Image (cartoon, coloured by chain):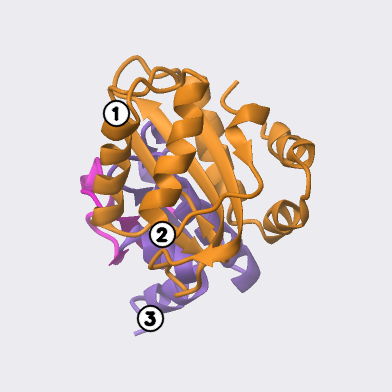
Amino acid sequence: MLINKNLVTLNLEAKNKEEAIIKLAELAQKEGKITSVEEYARSVFDREKAYTTGVGNGIAIPHGKSKAVKEAMIVFGKTTDGIEWDSLDGKPVNLIFLLGVPEENVDNVHLKILSQLSRKLMNDSFIEMLKKAVTVEEILNALSDIQVS
Amino acid sequence: MKIVAVTACPTGIAHTYMAAEALENAAKKLGHKIKVETQGSIGIENKITQKEVDEADLVIFAADVAVKEESRFKDKPIYKVEAQKAIKNAKAVIEEALKLVNK
């Protein structure tokens, strides 16, 4: 599974995007998805430098491809205080999807799930569902119907 | 109008697909036919054939990296933008692109 209940946090507290990325990466390390928070986070920060992953609508989708990633993953964080993310629409971010992909031997099925998730983030009703969700189960349910075609 | 589009980004994990979805949704709303090829980490998906290029009125590249097999599109008007522009406002991207044809 790309995501499980331990990779979801509904009260992420972070002052800025770097801290948010590190905190979510720490969850991934606890679950054994990555070998090094530092190394993985570096790949994410590099990606952010190219241009922002704050895609508007309160959503950010930071991601990194790194040797430190053992298995493709999704970590989800929700915050009540918006985080400044240089978003495309200038608004702060409340929903963060941190994605990780290994450098080599990536499972195509995983990549397809990540691509389907990215597409769904353009869908207003999906976003509304995530914004309204108050339990981890609701988040997991919303994500569980991502189908690999 | 018949539009064909290609989306691509450096890691090919997120923006490629978000831009594709945004363009598909916007084209539908504007009443145009569109086929969007994604060139991402999975490789090329929903590939545009030469026949489809020939039949298209317009080509859009929403890409931050070089588009693969670009020669397919050589005889067509091509509108090039960054992938994030399509994510931010796909409708505006399509409307701008259409100006290439309606000139």
* Mark 3 surroundings within 10 Å by alpha-carbon count, few (fewer than 14), some (14 through 19), many (20 or more): few
Q: CA distance from mark 1 to mark 2?
A: 22 Å
**Magenta segment boundaries in residue numbering:** B55-81
The mark closer to the camera, 3 or 2, is: 2
Please name the amino acid that badge 1 sits on.
Ser
Secondary structure of residue under mark 2: loop
- Image quarter hosting the C terminus of chain A: top right
Report which residue position mark 1 lands on.
Answer: A66
Can I make out residue A52 in this image? yes
Whether callout 1 and callout 2 share a subunit is answered yes
Letter of the chain in purple: B
Mark number, residue B99: 3
Mark number, residue B38: none
Residue visible at 50% across and 69% down?
Answer: A92
The mark closer to the camera, 1 or 2, is: 2
Q: Is residue A44 above or below residue A26?
A: below
Q: Earlier in the sequence, mark 1 or mark 2?
A: 2
Rendering coords of residue B71 (x, y %): 21, 47
* Mark 1 surroundings within 10 Å by alpha-carbon count, few (fewer than 14), some (14 through 19), many (20 or more): many
Chain containing the residue with disc 2: A
Q: Is residue B78 magenta?
A: yes
Secondary structure of residue under mark 3: loop
Chain containing the residue with disc 3: B
Report which residue position mark 2 lands on.
Answer: A16
Residue visible at 59% across and 32% down?
Answer: A7
Colour that chain A carries in the picture: orange
